[in-house]
Structure formats: structure tokens, C-alpha cells
Amino acid sequence: MLQLNLSKRSSNSNEHHHDSSKKSKLTFELKHAFHTVKSQIPLTHCVWLLITIFLQILILFFLIRSSPPHPPPSNSQQLVALNPDCQSGYVYVYDLPATFNTEFIDKCEELDPWKSRCKAVSNGGFGPSATGLERVVPEDITPAWYWTDMYAAEVIYHNRMLSHKCRIMDPEKATGFYIPFYAGLDIGKFLWFNYTAKDRDRKSEMVLDWLKEQPTFTRANGVDHFIMLGRLTWDFRRLTANDSEWGSSLLYMPLMKNVFRLSVEKHQNDDLEESVPYPTAFHPRSESDIVQWQNYIRNYDRTKLFSFVGAKREKIKNDFRGVLMDYCKSEENCLAVDCATTVCSDGAPAIMEAFLDSDFCLQPRGDGLTRRSTFDCMLAGSIPVYFWRGTFKGQYEWHLPWMAESYTVFIDHDNVRDTNGSLILQVLQGIHKDKVKEMRETLINLLPKFVYATPGKDLGSVKDAFDITIDRVLKRLKSRRDQYFES
């Protein structure tokens, strides 16, 4: 037993001595290596190496400190989680004081110096229910027809927006901000007679004064805001303070410089503006309404080659409408509806009958380059013939194909005037019937994109003019806001 213990102690002692020898050897090797390095790298070089490393760490620290904070999740990321149907974003609708919108409807008798506008702004902008359409429209879809005014879009858009599925009540989650100011109804009564420039600008200045007090407007200087203008863009582009000059100066006011705008006719050189279809009389309640009307106009028996609906403007020198009316009345292939003697407003039965009965419809420029009648014509499946390139070029790009020749015919107005209109017949007779059928089918397929559905109704998979507009607006506003904050 004693011998065994002594053997263990001797063994432990040998191991301990062996470990100590290993540690001593390792320490000696490290010291030797250190002295070797010292002998090969001068001290001054070591100092500069340490300074360089320190400076690099210091620069990295300041770069991290000066870099912008990570942006919060984009609206699109947040919105997908909220509602998968609103992939383009959400709209916040400002609750403006009534003086900027609903008060115009309450005081509709004052909107026009010649006649009451109360019917025009009724039914959420659709106007009164249409009557007298028994010979024109299938009976079961007549409830979807209204006498809708050509300048009622701002009321229609506001009404639709209030019940839109992508409207949101929390401004912090909004992609875009809608300003429901009825600028068209406001300026309408000031365009004539002895009103001053201040009269025409008063409400516009007031609404912008209200907006500049809103944090949601000032934080991005309005780049994520938009407005619907119910009239032509030219009615809001007065350049001077001259009382005799037309329109208001709304679009040239400083606070409007970033606000995106919609109108029934846009300025083609303004990147902040987009045109949307004029309202027509048809406001479908379902996808079935649309399909039924499409089939109806596809199979309608048309007896005339072309038609013209309009009236001469005697006070306008070299009035082109007069050229078209005189020629159409003299040509057996043309159906003329003279609005000097026939009621033609808001899609009246005489208008729809004429367009349904003809393959083509003549569409001169209106108060601007575009015309509400063009959309009435296309609604009936009649192919528009236009005479100024600006009528389609650059207009309605969100809703109609950029290749206008696939569903329209262009004839230069100067050439028509030189031939007293006979060129029209020559051109239209030269289009093969199969081509006419193809062009009409293009129009029929486009139809849902330029009509405004009845609010609260389900069109299934179909998107109407309003849906397309708001989807594109939100995408545009999100892109603009992202660019604004990145810069």
C-alpha cells in the first residue's frame, strides 16, 4: 500500500515537472517570437500602424453616425397586411369645410348665371334618371342610365371616394390625400360678366390657406395630394391678375405646385396632370349590365356610314362645325342631328339614336381639344372621326390605348375644309367592313374603362374609369413621395 502511494506521488511529481517544462518552453518561444518581430519591424512603423487602425475606426464611426436612419416600412408593405385588395395604397379624404364642396350643391341655383344646375349635381353627380330611352336602351338596364352633366366629375369622384374600399380614416397610413374641392363648380359662375380676378380666385385661395395648416400637407409639400377638376384645365390657368382674362389662377398658385390633378382635359405639357373620361349617361350596376350593353351595340343594325351631332357656332369665324353640319346635311350617307333645334344635352335620346345608327361619328374639337360627345359616340359603339391630333394624343392615356388608330380615324381639319367635307366620305368608304368590325370590337372591349359605375355596386372583376384612375393615382403619388424623401 505504501509502495503504491509512493509510486503515485512519484508519477504525479514527474507529470508536474513535465508540465512546468512545457510552459517554460512555450513562454520562451513566445518571448523569442516577440523579440524577433521587434527586431524586424521598427518601433516607428508599429506606432504608425496603430494610428492608421485608429483613424479607420474613427472614420467608420462618423460614417455610421451621419447616415440617415432606416426609413419606416413603406405604405405598400403596411397596406398589404391591412387589405390585399388595396395593393396600390390607401386614400385619405380631407373633411373640408362645406363651403368648398357640399355648399355648392346646397346653393345649386347660384351655380350658373342662366339656368339652375340643381339637376346636374343631384344623385351624387349622376343627375336625374334618364327617360325616353325605350327605343334606344334595353328595358332591364334603363335604371343604369342618367342625364349626367359633362362637368359633374368632381361631384362623382367625391361621392365614390367616400365609399371607396381603399379609403382610410388614419392619415398616417395613407398613400395619397384627396382634396375634395369643387373648383369647377366654384369657377363656373364667375367665367362670364363683370366678375374680377379676385372673385375667381377667392375660394381657391381659401382652400389652400386651409391646407397649409394641415401637417399632412406641409410635411411633403403636397407631393402626395391630388384634386379632381370637373372642368377643362384651361379654366384654372389664368396667367395674370387682369379681370378680363379667362378663368381662375388655381393651378399657378404656389401651394399647388406639387399637387397632382385630374381633369376631363389636361394640359399636354404638364407632368402633374392626367385626363380622365368625361362622364356619360351609362352607370352600370353590375358586370351583367356591361356585358348586356356590349352585346347590344355589337349586334345593332346600323344604317348610316357616319353621323354628326352638334350645332353651328355662328359667332366663331371659320367655324369648323358649320362645315361639318352643312356637309352632313347634304350627304345621304350621313345622319345629322342639329342641336340648334334638337335637345342634345347630357346624352339625350336623339344623340344615342344617331350614334347607334352609324358606323362612324364626326368629332370636331369642343370648348377645348376634347369633347364629351366623343365618349357618347364610343359608348354607342360608333367609331370617332377626329380632326385635331390633340383630341386623343396625350389624353386619356390611363384609360385608352396610346395607338388611337386602332379605334379612331384621323382626318386633318384643314384638308376637310379644303374639300368642303367631301374628303370625309372618301376616307370612310375606303375602310373595309372587316376593319370597321375590328375597330368596333376594340371599342366594345374598352367600354368598361370609360364609364363610371353606380356607387356601392359590385362589378365583379371589372374595373371602371374611377377604379383605374384611383389605382394609377396612388401608384404615382407613392413614387413621387418616395422620391421626395430620398432627395
Image (cartoon, rainbow, N blue to C red):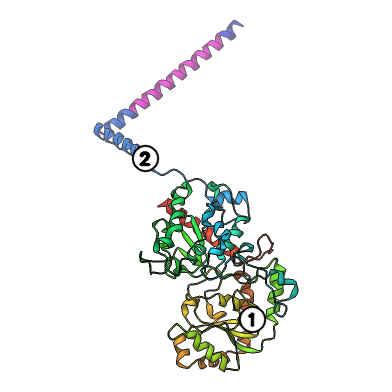
Most foreground residue, 172 or 452:
452
**Does residue 231 sit above or below 385 in this rendering?**
above
Could you say where residue 54 lies in the image, as x and y percent from the top left?
A: 32, 35
**Does residue 415 sit above or below 196 in this rendering?**
below
Tell me which numbered mark, 2 or 1, is placed earlier along the sequence. 2
Q: Quadrant of residue 455?
A: bottom right
- What residue is disc 1 on? 350
Label 2, secondary structure: give it.
Answer: helix
Residue 30 drawn in magenta? yes
Q: Which residues are magenta?
A: 6-32
Residue 14 drawn in magenta? yes
Label 1, secondary structure: give it.
Answer: helix
Position of residue 110 in the picture relative to residue 25 (left or right): right
In 3D space, how far apart are the residues under numbered discs 2 and 1 (Cα atoms)?
A: 77 Å
> Is mark 2 in CB contact (under 8 Å) with mark 1?
no
Q: Amino acid at mark 1?
A: Ala
- What residue is disc 2 on? 60
Kindly report which numbered mark, 2 or 1, lies closer to the viewer in this rendering.
Answer: 1
Could you say where residue 32 lies in the image, as x and y percent from the top left?
A: 33, 27
Could you say where residue 468 lies in the image, as x and y percent from the top left?
A: 58, 64
Most foreground residue, 45 or 349:
349
Q: Amino acid at mark 2?
A: Leu
Q: Quadrant of residue 300?
A: bottom right
Can residue 291 be seen in this snapshot? yes
